[in-house]
Image (spheres, grey):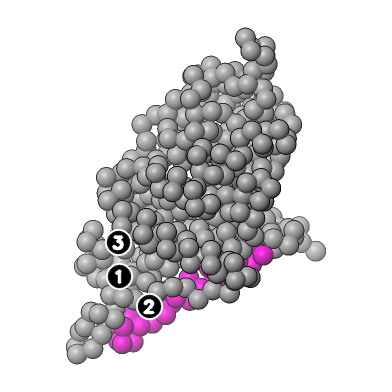
Amino acid sequence: MPVSRLLPTPEARDLLELVREIADVELLPVAAVHEREERFPREVFRTLGKAGILGLPYPEEQGGGGQPYEVWLQVLEEIGARWASVAVGVSVHALTCFPLATYGTQEQQERWLPEMLGGELLGAYCLSEPDAGSDPGAMRTRAVRGQGADGEQYTVDGVKAWVTHGGHADFYTSMLRTSDSERGGISCLLVPGDTPGLSADRPEDKMGLTGSATATMRFDGAKVDADRLVGAEGQGLAIALAALDAGRLGIAAVAVGLAQGALDHAVAYAKERRTFGKAIIDHQGLGFVLADMEAAVVSARASYLDAARRKDLGMPYAKEASVAKLVATDAAMKVTTDAVQVLGGYGYTRDFPVERFMREAKVMQIFEGTNQIQRLVISRHLAKAR
């Protein structure tokens, strides 16, 4: 059933209606097949790009939709309720555009940003490495600047792990080591997907989100023109950390959508399934489980909206983003597990989508910073508070 939302403008209400319509017509009918066949839905992203959805949180003068984060996250939630793999991909794509849109020169933005925000170019984000996940400062993939045949270039060598859209992306927003400085040794390069020396390993065999390709990317003497440096050399870690706050809100919204989808299926089943002469939703034991699921979803939604509204007002929101990511993803895990329980034996079969929702929920607690990292971020903010 449609979620009751408090939206800031009539335009936002119309936008959410459009997103629901597209998600119901273009995404929902094919989601299960793509997930079962582990097929990457590249055309879906083009469809969403043509509808203007991929660029919604960016300014209109950059080719985006000019929507506040409060609205953008609810768009992600609606997509996540139908197809979590695509919602995660949309969130990641927005994350890959953030460095260029925020730190790029006007010339760089005019050159690349319209096609990125329009969905013609699909992005991937290269930050983690096999030995540098929660600690990005430990990365070792190196970019060395020098003179190439056509001007200054970086030569990149190393490995990036857990790359969403790896092997399918048209560009890779990559955080790379350009010096040995502890804080200022990382820079951001916009690497074209067809760069010689850049290759993708076989996608990971994942527990869930099987319609989303996740792969290790290898840089073997890859040459990247120096004009693809985003921001100043050595500014990459600051760019990455700024982007992660917004990325965590994206995952929080997707997790709420996933939980809402599981709740909707559980409620629909509980209204139809009858035991002892009445619908099982009318049995107090099960009705209370559904009530707790609803409370978890509503509370998680409130947490990400609070953080989003702070971001829209230009207020600090790093702590609130970590709170939202922690609360929403833990809620998604609990709600999807309970949805399987509500459906009983049927919930454990692939005849119903709740078993897939449960598998998909687990990774929400891991990527964009594990929930243990979120607790660390929150506790540090508390220690600094006066």
Contact check, label 2 and label 1, Cβ < 8 Å = yes
Residue at numbered disc 3? 353
Q: Amino acid type of disc 2? A: Val
Range of residues picked out in magenta: 281-309
The relative height of residue 351 versus residue 191 in the rendered view (above or below) is: below
In the rendered image, residue 354, in percent from the top left (x then y), is placed at 31, 63
Mark 3 residue element: loop
Q: Amino acid type of disc 1? A: Gln
Q: Is residue 170 left or right of residue 270?
A: right
Mark 2 residue element: helix
Mark 2 closeness class: few <14, some 14–19, many ≥20 residues within 10 Å: some
Where residue 185 sits, quadrant-wise, is top right
The tag earlier along the polypeptide, 2 or 1, is 2
Residue at numbered disc 2? 289
The tag earlier along the polypeptide, 1 or 3, is 1
Residue at numbered disc 1? 341
Query: Which circle, 2 or 3, is nearer the viewer?
Result: 3
> In the rendered structure, does residue 106 fall within the stretch colored magenta?
no
Please identify the residue farthest to the bottom as the structure is shown. 277
